[in-house]
Amino acid sequence: MSRIWEQFQFLRPGWTDLVEILMVAFLLYRLLLVIQRTRAMQILMGLLLLGFSYGVARLLDLILIRTLLETLFQYGAIAALVVFQPELRSALARLGQSRMFRAFQRLEGSRVTDEIVEAVERLSRNKVGAIIALERDVGLEEYAQTGSPVDAPVSADMLTTIFTPYSPLHDGAVLVSGDTIRSAGAILPLTQSPVKDRSLGTRHRAALGLSEETDAVVVVVSEETAQVSVALGGSLERGVDPERLRILLDGVRPDGEAALRPAPAGA
């Protein structure tokens, strides 16, 4: 009896086993958060179906199907890296963005917020399109290199000048790091997620794309409707008024994460 009991001792988890289980569960949870409602989730379901088929083939000794699936799995890792590249990049960028790491984060300086809010109000009044990304924890160096360096203090006058129609840099994005305009005319990645609202233009899709890959706060002014939108964490809030914009830029929630509201009806 004691010998049988000893054989099952491996079923008694130690504290290291519990730590490993928690770490794996956390990583899987973060991965599922990143790929939910994306094409990656559909591909993952397909892979699970293939895995189930392989298990049935082994159980019933279906040699041909098992051989084909084993060959597929052997080279599937390389294919998965190519297919899942956008999602993997997004997941790696956002793994450290848990609430405990953002508990005390705040955007630098109320002056920067004031200048950005004032600039957005001016641009909205004049129906001038704009996209402004504010760097937080994840660096934007990769995207800054696609634009022209500015390295000027954040000011409403500078921002409105950059987005003046027909100016050399008005079509790209402005990247703000701390209290400095780091780059202008930057090219941002378009969202990989399906966008149901066909009224969203390239600026909105670029704002969503950057917010999916980083924790940046991205402000968009529509030149067609003069509507202000904010993208954060892969979500887009439309019809943002100046007071609401100030709240989102300051990140007033205690956990350091600004909450986006659904777009108002008819927006």
Image (spheres, grey):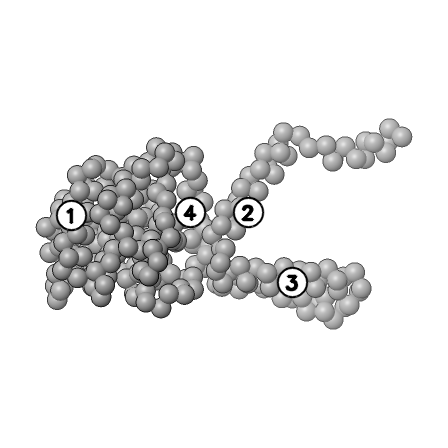
Q: Picture coordinates of residue 251 (x, y %)?
A: 31, 40
Upstream in the sequence, badge 4 or badge 2? Answer: 2
Residue sticking out furthest to the right: 1
Q: Amino acid at mark 4?
A: Arg
Badge 4 local density, few (<14 within 10 Å), some, or many (20+)? many
Amino acid bearing label 2: Leu
Q: CA distance from mark 2 to mark 1?
A: 42 Å
Which residue corresponds to the image point at 23% horizontal and 44% vertical from the top-left?
Answer: 243
Q: Earlier in the sequence, mark 2 or mark 3?
A: 2
Q: CA distance from mark 4 to mark 3?
A: 28 Å
Residue at 15% in and 48% down? 118
Secondary element type, mark 3: helix
Give percent across and percent down for residue 110: 20, 37
- On the image, numbered disc 4 is attached to which residue? 94
Query: x, y percentage for residue 222?
Result: 23, 61
State the quadrant of the N terminus. Answer: top right
Which corner quadrant of the image does residue 100 belong to? top left
Pointer 1 local density, CA inside 10 Å: few below 14, some 14–19, many at least 20: some
Which of the labelled discs sits on residue 49, or is there none?
A: 3
What is the C-alpha distance between the residues marked 1 and 4? Answer: 30 Å
Could you tell which of marks 1 and 3 lies nearer the N-terminus?
Answer: 3
Tag on residue 28? 2
Locate residue 137 relative to residue 170 in the image: left or right: right
Res. 153 mark: none
Can you see residue 199? yes
